[in-house]
Image (spheres, grey):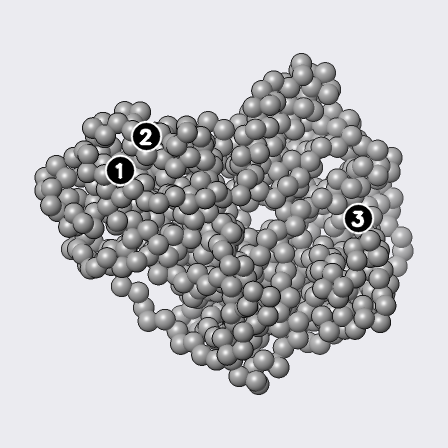
Amino acid sequence: MAKRTESQLMTNRLQSHPILAVPVRETISFTWDGHPLTGLLGDTVTSALVAAGVDCFGHHTKDESPQGLFCANGQCSACLVMADGIPVKGCMTPLREGMELLPVDDLPSLPADDSPPTMGEIPVRHVEVLIIGGGPAGMAAAVELGTAGVETLLVDDKRALGGKLVLQTHKFFGSEEDSRAGTRGYEIARLMGTQVERLPSVDVRLYTTAVAIYSDGMVGLVTGSGLPGGTRYYLAQPRRLLIATGARERMLPFPGNTLPGVFGAGAFQTLVNRDLVACSRRVLVVGAGNVGLIAAYHALQAGVEVAAVVEFTPDVGGYGVHADKLRRLGVPILTRHTILQADGDGRVERAVIGAVAEDGAVIPGSEQTFTVDTVLIAVGLNKVDEFSRKAVAAGIPVHSAGDAAEIAEASAAMIDGRLAGRTIAAELGHTPAPVCDSDWTAKLTVLRSKPGPTHAGRGLLGKALVEPVFHCLQEIPCNPCTSVCPEGAIATMDDAITGVPYLFKSDACKACFNCVRVCPGLAITLVDSRRDHDHPTVTLPYELPREGLTVGTRVTVVGREGEELGLHPVTKILNPSRAYPATALVQLQLPRELAGRAAGFRPPAPAASPAGAITAAVAAAAQTVICRCERATQAEIRTAIKAGVRDLNQLKALTRAGMGSCGGKTCRPLLERLMKEEGVPVEEVTPLTERPLFVEVPLGILAGGREDRS
């Protein structure tokens, strides 16, 4: 097990956070591999282990390679541990007092008692609508269905509704009316969850996993997994099924990609934002879409240094305001770069990147080595859509919403869920044909659209004594600043939600700071020239830790893309307001020629870790794993494809790729990608046969037994 120093172990819980409150929770005692440890009430097994400094959860039986957390969402099996003698996914298992945890270094033996389990009665619940997934799409649909009085069962495998919303500390984009723009993700989850739970016709079942969809129209549900009351299995037979299961992390093939410390971006956000566990000290982020850019900013909020963000393509794929926030804080964003490998003794200690040419080939001599303890993989998501395919095959009327239908922002998922809920209610005869369908569909199209062109900045217009300056110059769906101005002085170009904002009433601004505080991209500043025309006061939003930041602190003022404008002292700090909690305002007095350009600041940063060229010895140290569960490597899979294998099921029989406990969820897209890279036409590839069960379930539970570990 890779170990950290005692001082690190003492600080693996976040003691403070600029956005999130750190609650006081009850302490729980447990053991790991015989060693007594403590966790907190509400922890999952993996969050408690990582908080205690445990990075390695076991070693693979094939090659003794260390195994660590990857997705933290129950989609892979990298966090498999033994809990009181039973193999479980640690990320989905609540920690309990006295729990005995062990690494799964050897496959557990079967129980000595081989008598068949007692067959119990399997309850069947008939319901009008079953929603699988309690994220933004599932909750939005439940609100529409519940408002129409439709009997609805909403199941989710987590401890609370919200899905990925509970991991988001940033303010949301879109519009205030349709997607609560300007409100932080975890707050949206709480608001929507409360709204759902107040609807009498909606029954919410947490810690409940949909494990199968059967040909007779039944859906198998396992509820209470890991809870003191015990695990139960029952069947639901819905008239309509809504799949709102979201998306899963994409794995990336590179040597060392299964080392502990290589996380999916969602796993990192789960640890630092949901569980308040400081799982990293210095990270490299791979992928400059919105997920990667936001995860990098969340790392900074948690006090984690970001070495760099690397992106294979020539351009940043996410919103420009997200990239600009990072650049202003000194984080390099390296486009046309890729990760070449990660290595370390038992966990990530270094990561090697390289520049790529237009044809995707790595440019010789461009390699750099970063000293990091974490690599965040944020190279896109894959839809969790196996439920939909099974439902169609079973003849169950099914709809999909959110990322399960199309990968997009959570703001789009909310609209999509509303559309799905209203459509299903109409199909069941509870409402007339869906109203505002065309309006919502148009909004959904906009919210799913890619970022538009970037316009030239206007800077300080100088027509008013008080003037907001808009540093958000890219066309993206976002306009909360137009809603919060009490003077109604802000509009967007062409009055479109994607239009760049501007001040159209030059003398109306009263310096209320609402637009500065609400902006999700932290891209609005306020210039006040009433006291000193030549040295106006510039107000900047700030959401990072404030230790060491006081009046008089000299900070490096930067422009929109991080260009340095000089050292200047802080003149005043305004605490967050009740209406806009967690967004502080920092004021500086700047020369007028800089006032319109200043978009942010960064305090003095520690020296960056050294970077250098990769050595041949390091380059040959690790293999590229495609199937995490079975340690099937890229080399052996390519060999099989070159030998003529075109059936992924045959490939599974030869290499075991896709045979592991995750059921091929993580490796299947990589197998399809390797086929394409080897020149195999898509129509020649026989897809991997999906398992009848989506999730591992003890046979005794399926037989109607109860698993009670209390």
Mark 3 or 2: the one toward you: 2
Mark 3 or 1: the one toward you: 1
- Residue at point 24% right, 32% down? 512
Q: Position of residue 445 (x, y in %)?
A: 57, 34
- Residue at point 39% right, 55% down? 326
Residue to which mark 2 is pinned: 490
Residue to which mark 1 is pinned: 468
Identify the secondary structure beneath mark 3. Answer: loop
Looking at this view, name the residue that lies furthest to the bottom. Answer: 617
Direction from residue 371 to residue 549 in the image, left or right: left
User: Label 2: how many residues lie within 10 Å, few (<14), some (14-19) or many (20+)?
Assistant: many
- The numbered disc on residue 693 is 3
Q: Amino acid type of disc 3? A: Leu
Q: Amino acid type of disc 1? A: Pro
- The numbered disc on residue 232 is none
- Cα separation, mark 3 vs mark 2, equals 53 Å
Image quarter hosting the N terminus: bottom right
Of residues 259 and 157, the one nearer the viewer is 259
Q: Choose top left, top right, bottom left or bottom right for residue 489.
A: top left
Q: Amino acid type of disc 2? A: Ile
- Cα separation, mark 3 vs mark 1, equals 56 Å
